[in-house]
Amino acid sequence: MQHIETQEQNNKIPLLVLVGPTAVGKTALSIELAQRYNAEIISGDSMQVYRGMDIGTAKIKENEREGIVHHLIDICDPEDSFSAADFQARAKALIEDIHSRGKLPFVVGGTGLYIESLCYQYRFVDHGSDEAFRMEMEAFAEEHGNEALHQKLEAVDPAAAGRLHPNDVRRIIRALEVFHLTGKPFSEHQSGQERGQEKESPYHLVILGLTRDRSKLYERIEQRIDQMLDEGLVEEVRTLLARKLPMHAVPRQALGYKEMIAYLEGDISYERAVELLKRDTRRFAKRQLSWFRHMQDLHWVDMDENFEEILQAIHAIIAGKFQGHLEYSTNQSFK
């Protein structure tokens, strides 16, 4: 029986996945692993797909990539929409292409829904769109406020409203749009994707989850935000605002951007914006960890350990899962 299972796994495309909360250390480790395993990286970050959102998303710089090919970075404008379904389709095609060229597909990121939808092939249904309805809802939010828009959703889809923050205008409008188009709550369309159910992957998976001591993680988050501000986060947001972003545009709801937009539009002080950004990023990291803890097939790696010991621990995990597929050596061809 075990032999049959091993044979089935070997017939699947191997896929290495690295997840973890913001500021845990994914980027540096991903470069090291990509070099050792002859991999190409597919970004699993919902914000790094957008051009012009570099500092606030901690996007890896060109000179930090060490020659490693990165995919799904800078592929959309901030006014565009890019969904989990879009990510799943693009990443699936990339995995097949990377594998066909003898390299290891390697997904790295912190957007749990994107990564789980890819690893276990969630089914997404295209409900269509109604641009006029969307603009009507945007105008409603402008006039009456985000809370009033959130209450509209609560009236027709309490389950979806319970999952969405009132400031997440883009997703609230999408949920209302789905109800408007189909007559059914958005949450009902997602019922077949309930988390916690055992799922089978079309890939031969190794999923690594990075963690740190909570106080050290929060310290790294604060340091990262200070660095973002030093690198020009406020100017980056000012440049985006000059594009006359519509209400549904991603930066208006994105962490690191919405706080600075509130400051630049005179709603709060700079000090308050920074305070909110640090607080909300800590909360975001906590939600990310909570999501990853519910993922199956995940191997936790403690990033507070010595870096070489971390690499050895990861090698043991990968070698145990991918035996017969690859060897642990720099630029070793992936077969």
Image (cartoon, rainbow, N blue to C red):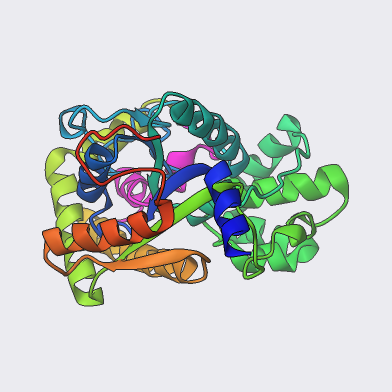
Residue 76: where, in percent of width, then height? 46, 27
Residue 161: where, in percent of width, then height? 66, 64
Q: Find the residue positioned furthest to the right.
A: 183
- Is residue 163 toward the left or the right of residue 304 in the image? right
Is 249 colored magenta in this rendering? yes
Q: Nearer the viewer, residue 184 or 238?
A: 184
- Is residue 284 toward the left or the right of residue 312 in the image? right
Residue ID at (59%, 35%) = 86
Tell me if I can see residue 228 in this picture. Answer: yes
Residue 194: where, in percent of width, then height? 69, 64
Residue ID at (25%, 39%) = 55
Q: Report which quarter residue 213 is drawn in.
A: bottom left
Q: Is residue 221 above or below residue 46?
A: below
Tell me if I can see residue 76 in this picture. Answer: no
Q: Report which quarter residue 6 is drawn in.
A: bottom right
Q: Nearer the viewer, residue 312 or 157?
A: 312
- Is residue 231 toward the left or the right of residue 182 in the image? left
Residue 219: where, in percent of width, then height? 17, 67
Q: How many marks?
A: 0
Per the rendered image, the range of residues in magenta is: 245-268
Residue ID at (51%, 49%) = 204
- Is residue 291 toward the left or the right of residue 283 in the image? right
Query: Which quarter of the rendered picture does the N terminus lie within?
Result: bottom right
Q: Nearer the viewer, residue 54 or 292?
A: 292
Is 243 colored magenta in this rendering? no
Q: Report which quarter residue 181 is drawn in.
A: top right
Residue ID at (36%, 27%) = 242
Query: Which quarter of the rendered picture does the C terminus lie within?
Result: top left
